[in-house]
Amino acid sequence: MGQPPHDHVCVTKQQSEAAAAARVAVRLGLRKRAELLELIRPAFGRTGPWLQAGKYVAAVMSDLPRRNGWTIARFAGDRSPDRTQRLLNRAAWDTMAAMAAVRRFAVAGLDEAAGRRRGRRPLAVGALDETGQEKAGTGTAGVKRQHMGCAGGVENGINTVHLSYVREGAGHALIGARQWIPADQISDPVRSLLAGLPLDLEFRTKGQLAIDIMADARASGVELDFVCGDEVYGNCTQLREELEARARRTYCGCRRTSGSTWPAGSR
Protein backbone atom coordinates (compact mmCIF):
# COMPACT_ATOMS: atom_id res chain seq x y z
CA MET A 1 0.00 0.00 0.00
CA GLY A 2 1.16 3.54 -0.74
CA GLN A 3 1.80 6.25 1.81
CA PRO A 4 -1.20 8.47 2.74
CA PRO A 5 -1.24 11.88 1.05
CA HIS A 6 0.65 14.62 2.90
CA ASP A 7 -2.50 16.80 3.15
CA HIS A 8 -4.38 13.97 4.85
CA VAL A 9 -1.60 13.57 7.42
CA CYS A 10 -1.68 17.33 8.17
CA VAL A 11 -5.46 17.35 8.61
CA THR A 12 -5.34 14.33 10.91
CA LYS A 13 -2.61 15.95 13.00
CA GLN A 14 -4.57 19.20 13.28
CA GLN A 15 -7.68 17.30 14.33
CA SER A 16 -5.73 15.43 16.99
CA GLU A 17 -4.21 18.65 18.30
CA ALA A 18 -7.62 20.33 18.38
CA ALA A 19 -9.12 17.38 20.25
CA ALA A 20 -6.27 17.42 22.75
CA ALA A 21 -6.68 21.17 23.28
CA ALA A 22 -10.43 20.69 23.82
CA ARG A 23 -9.80 18.01 26.45
CA VAL A 24 -7.33 20.29 28.26
CA ALA A 25 -9.88 23.14 28.19
CA VAL A 26 -12.61 20.88 29.60
CA ARG A 27 -10.37 19.70 32.43
CA LEU A 28 -9.36 23.29 33.19
CA GLY A 29 -13.00 24.39 33.20
CA LEU A 30 -13.99 21.61 35.60
CA ARG A 31 -11.07 22.42 37.89
CA LYS A 32 -11.92 26.12 37.93
CA ARG A 33 -15.59 25.42 38.62
CA ALA A 34 -14.65 23.18 41.54
CA GLU A 35 -12.34 25.94 42.81
CA LEU A 36 -15.17 28.47 42.62
CA LEU A 37 -17.56 26.19 44.50
CA GLU A 38 -15.03 25.78 47.28
CA LEU A 39 -14.67 29.55 47.51
CA ILE A 40 -18.43 30.04 48.01
CA ARG A 41 -18.73 27.14 50.50
CA PRO A 42 -18.52 29.42 53.60
CA ALA A 43 -21.62 31.31 52.38
CA PHE A 44 -23.75 28.20 52.98
CA GLY A 45 -24.64 26.98 56.44
CA ARG A 46 -25.79 23.57 55.20
CA THR A 47 -24.24 21.15 52.71
CA GLY A 48 -27.46 20.43 50.81
CA PRO A 49 -28.02 23.94 49.43
CA TRP A 50 -24.31 24.24 48.58
CA LEU A 51 -24.41 21.00 46.55
CA GLN A 52 -27.56 22.19 44.78
CA ALA A 53 -25.81 25.49 44.04
CA GLY A 54 -23.06 23.47 42.37
CA LYS A 55 -25.63 21.75 40.14
CA TYR A 56 -27.18 25.11 39.30
CA VAL A 57 -23.82 26.68 38.42
CA ALA A 58 -22.94 23.69 36.21
CA ALA A 59 -26.23 24.05 34.33
CA VAL A 60 -25.84 27.81 33.87
CA MET A 61 -22.29 27.30 32.55
CA SER A 62 -23.35 24.50 30.18
CA ASP A 63 -24.38 24.71 26.53
CA LEU A 64 -28.07 24.21 27.26
CA PRO A 65 -29.95 25.93 24.41
CA ARG A 66 -32.64 27.09 26.87
CA ARG A 67 -32.25 27.62 30.60
CA ASN A 68 -35.40 27.34 32.67
CA GLY A 69 -36.51 25.40 35.70
CA TRP A 70 -37.17 22.16 33.85
CA THR A 71 -34.08 22.14 31.60
CA ILE A 72 -31.85 22.90 34.59
CA ALA A 73 -33.56 20.13 36.60
CA ARG A 74 -32.99 17.58 33.83
CA PHE A 75 -29.35 18.65 33.49
CA ALA A 76 -28.85 18.36 37.27
CA GLY A 77 -30.56 14.96 37.44
CA ASP A 78 -33.49 16.25 39.52
CA ARG A 79 -37.05 15.04 39.01
CA SER A 80 -38.45 18.58 39.06
CA PRO A 81 -37.32 22.22 39.47
CA ASP A 82 -38.32 22.14 43.16
CA ARG A 83 -34.79 21.81 44.56
CA THR A 84 -33.38 24.68 42.51
CA GLN A 85 -36.42 26.86 43.23
CA ARG A 86 -36.00 26.15 46.94
CA LEU A 87 -32.34 27.16 46.68
CA LEU A 88 -33.16 30.45 44.98
CA ASN A 89 -36.32 31.33 46.90
CA ARG A 90 -36.19 29.92 50.43
CA ALA A 91 -32.82 28.35 51.31
CA ALA A 92 -30.66 30.23 53.85
CA TRP A 93 -27.32 31.33 52.42
CA ASP A 94 -25.33 34.56 52.42
CA THR A 95 -25.90 36.15 49.02
CA MET A 96 -23.41 38.98 49.52
CA ALA A 97 -20.67 36.63 50.76
CA ALA A 98 -21.19 34.38 47.73
CA MET A 99 -21.11 37.40 45.42
CA ALA A 100 -17.87 38.59 47.01
CA ALA A 101 -16.26 35.18 46.47
CA VAL A 102 -17.33 35.15 42.82
CA ARG A 103 -16.03 38.70 42.41
CA ARG A 104 -12.59 37.83 43.78
CA PHE A 105 -12.48 34.70 41.60
CA ALA A 106 -13.39 36.59 38.41
CA VAL A 107 -11.03 39.50 39.04
CA ALA A 108 -8.12 37.18 39.85
CA GLY A 109 -8.68 35.25 36.63
CA LEU A 110 -8.83 38.36 34.46
CA ASP A 111 -5.80 39.88 36.18
CA GLU A 112 -3.84 36.68 35.59
CA ALA A 113 -4.79 36.69 31.89
CA ALA A 114 -3.90 40.39 31.58
CA GLY A 115 -0.56 39.78 33.29
CA ARG A 116 0.51 37.45 30.49
CA ARG A 117 0.47 40.32 28.01
CA ARG A 118 3.75 41.97 27.16
CA GLY A 119 4.32 45.71 27.08
CA ARG A 120 2.46 48.27 29.15
CA ARG A 121 0.10 47.27 31.92
CA PRO A 122 -3.42 46.64 30.55
CA LEU A 123 -6.11 48.97 31.88
CA ALA A 124 -8.63 47.86 34.49
CA VAL A 125 -11.99 49.52 33.82
CA GLY A 126 -15.25 49.52 35.77
CA ALA A 127 -18.39 49.79 33.63
CA LEU A 128 -21.63 50.75 35.40
CA ASP A 129 -24.92 49.98 33.71
CA GLU A 130 -28.31 48.47 34.37
CA THR A 131 -30.25 45.60 32.89
CA GLY A 132 -33.98 45.05 32.77
CA GLN A 133 -35.93 41.83 32.91
CA GLU A 134 -39.57 41.63 31.92
CA LYS A 135 -41.88 40.12 34.54
CA ALA A 136 -45.57 39.29 34.59
CA GLY A 137 -47.78 40.19 37.55
CA THR A 138 -47.03 42.29 40.62
CA GLY A 139 -45.61 39.80 43.14
CA THR A 140 -41.91 40.12 42.33
CA ALA A 141 -39.87 42.55 44.43
CA GLY A 142 -39.22 45.75 42.47
CA VAL A 143 -41.55 44.92 39.60
CA LYS A 144 -43.48 47.79 37.99
CA ARG A 145 -44.07 49.39 34.62
CA GLN A 146 -40.82 51.16 33.80
CA HIS A 147 -38.37 51.67 30.96
CA MET A 148 -36.83 48.34 30.01
CA GLY A 149 -33.83 48.42 27.70
CA CYS A 150 -34.36 44.78 26.79
CA ALA A 151 -37.90 45.59 25.59
CA GLY A 152 -37.04 48.88 23.91
CA GLY A 153 -39.66 50.80 25.85
CA VAL A 154 -41.88 50.84 28.92
CA GLU A 155 -42.86 47.37 30.11
CA ASN A 156 -43.62 45.54 33.34
CA GLY A 157 -40.39 44.28 34.89
CA ILE A 158 -37.42 44.83 37.21
CA ASN A 159 -34.14 46.73 36.83
CA THR A 160 -30.77 45.81 38.35
CA VAL A 161 -27.62 47.95 38.52
CA HIS A 162 -24.42 46.10 37.58
CA LEU A 163 -20.68 46.69 37.70
CA SER A 164 -18.55 44.96 35.07
CA TYR A 165 -14.81 44.50 35.52
CA VAL A 166 -13.08 44.97 32.18
CA ARG A 167 -9.44 43.99 31.67
CA GLU A 168 -8.00 45.38 28.46
CA GLY A 169 -7.08 42.56 26.09
CA ALA A 170 -8.22 39.86 28.53
CA GLY A 171 -12.01 40.00 28.90
CA HIS A 172 -14.71 41.17 31.27
CA ALA A 173 -17.07 39.84 33.92
CA LEU A 174 -19.93 41.13 36.05
CA ILE A 175 -18.62 41.52 39.61
CA GLY A 176 -21.45 43.30 41.41
CA ALA A 177 -25.20 43.85 41.31
CA ARG A 178 -27.92 45.57 43.31
CA GLN A 179 -31.59 45.48 42.39
CA TRP A 180 -33.40 48.80 42.22
CA ILE A 181 -36.55 48.86 44.37
CA PRO A 182 -39.07 51.71 43.83
CA ALA A 183 -39.66 53.98 46.83
CA ASP A 184 -43.43 53.40 46.85
CA GLN A 185 -42.93 49.65 47.33
CA ILE A 186 -40.56 50.19 50.27
CA SER A 187 -42.92 52.65 51.96
CA ASP A 188 -45.97 50.39 51.53
CA PRO A 189 -45.83 47.90 54.46
CA VAL A 190 -48.24 45.43 52.83
CA ARG A 191 -46.50 45.42 49.46
CA SER A 192 -43.11 45.28 51.17
CA LEU A 193 -44.15 42.25 53.25
CA LEU A 194 -45.63 40.39 50.29
CA ALA A 195 -42.48 41.01 48.22
CA GLY A 196 -40.24 39.79 51.06
CA LEU A 197 -38.28 43.04 51.31
CA PRO A 198 -36.00 43.52 54.34
CA LEU A 199 -37.65 45.50 57.12
CA ASP A 200 -34.74 47.96 57.30
CA LEU A 201 -34.48 48.52 53.53
CA GLU A 202 -33.99 52.15 52.55
CA PHE A 203 -34.68 53.62 49.13
CA ARG A 204 -31.58 54.07 46.97
CA THR A 205 -31.41 55.71 43.56
CA LYS A 206 -29.56 53.86 40.81
CA GLY A 207 -26.60 56.18 41.28
CA GLN A 208 -26.55 55.43 45.01
CA LEU A 209 -26.76 51.70 44.28
CA ALA A 210 -23.70 52.16 42.06
CA ILE A 211 -21.90 53.72 45.05
CA ASP A 212 -22.80 50.67 47.14
CA ILE A 213 -21.54 48.30 44.44
CA MET A 214 -18.28 50.23 44.14
CA ALA A 215 -17.86 49.95 47.92
CA ASP A 216 -18.36 46.17 47.69
CA ALA A 217 -15.69 45.97 44.99
CA ARG A 218 -13.29 48.13 46.98
CA ALA A 219 -13.78 45.88 50.03
CA SER A 220 -12.74 42.93 47.85
CA GLY A 221 -9.53 44.71 46.87
CA VAL A 222 -10.60 45.60 43.32
CA GLU A 223 -8.50 48.44 41.87
CA LEU A 224 -9.79 50.33 38.82
CA ASP A 225 -7.98 52.76 36.52
CA PHE A 226 -11.22 54.49 35.64
CA VAL A 227 -14.99 54.03 35.80
CA CYS A 228 -17.53 54.75 33.06
CA GLY A 229 -21.30 54.91 32.88
CA ASP A 230 -24.15 56.45 30.92
CA GLU A 231 -26.23 59.53 31.75
CA VAL A 232 -28.05 57.82 34.63
CA TYR A 233 -24.77 57.68 36.52
CA GLY A 234 -23.25 60.80 35.00
CA ASN A 235 -26.12 62.84 36.39
CA CYS A 236 -25.57 61.50 39.92
CA THR A 237 -23.43 64.17 41.57
CA GLN A 238 -22.91 62.01 44.67
CA LEU A 239 -21.44 59.17 42.57
CA ARG A 240 -19.13 61.45 40.61
CA GLU A 241 -17.85 63.11 43.77
CA GLU A 242 -17.34 59.73 45.41
CA LEU A 243 -15.24 58.46 42.50
CA GLU A 244 -13.20 61.65 42.16
CA ALA A 245 -12.53 61.73 45.91
CA ARG A 246 -10.91 58.32 45.53
CA ALA A 247 -8.79 59.49 42.57
CA ARG A 248 -10.80 57.46 40.09
CA ARG A 249 -10.72 58.76 36.54
CA THR A 250 -14.30 58.86 35.33
CA TYR A 251 -16.21 59.20 32.11
CA CYS A 252 -19.96 59.61 32.38
CA GLY A 253 -22.14 60.58 29.45
CA CYS A 254 -24.89 63.14 30.15
CA ARG A 255 -27.75 64.38 27.99
CA ARG A 256 -26.18 67.76 27.16
CA THR A 257 -22.53 67.36 28.04
CA SER A 258 -19.94 64.69 28.69
CA GLY A 259 -17.73 65.16 31.72
CA SER A 260 -14.37 63.52 32.27
CA THR A 261 -11.46 63.80 34.66
CA TRP A 262 -8.06 62.81 33.21
CA PRO A 263 -4.48 63.31 34.32
CA ALA A 264 -2.68 65.96 32.26
CA GLY A 265 -1.19 64.60 29.08
CA SER A 266 -3.17 61.34 29.02
CA ARG A 267 -5.55 60.39 26.24
Image (cartoon, rainbow, N blue to C red):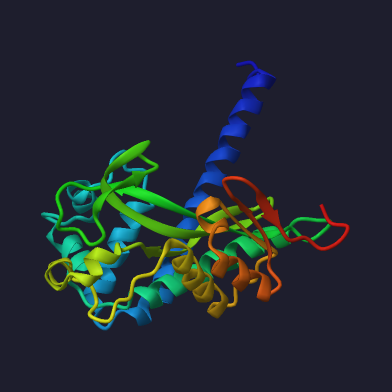
User: Which quadrant of the figure has residue 63?
Assistant: top left
User: Which quadrant of the figure has residue 77?
Assistant: bottom left
Q: Nearer the viewer, residue 5 or 56?
A: 56
Residue 116 left/right relative to 252: right
User: Which quadrant of the figure has residue 185?
Assistant: bottom left
Residue 37, percent from left and from top: 39, 70
- Which residue appears at 48% of the width and 69% of the height? 213
- Which residue appears at 47% of the width and 52% of the height? 26
Residue 38 left/right relative to 65: right
Residue 127, percent from left and from top: 57, 56
- Which residue appears at 64% of the width and 16% of the height? 2
Q: Which quadrant does the N terminus fall into?
A: top right
The answer to whether any part of residue 35 appears in the image is: no
The answer to whether any part of residue 34 appears in the image is: yes
Q: Nearer the viewer, residue 172 or 254?
A: 254
Instruction: List the single residue furthest toward the right.
Output: 265
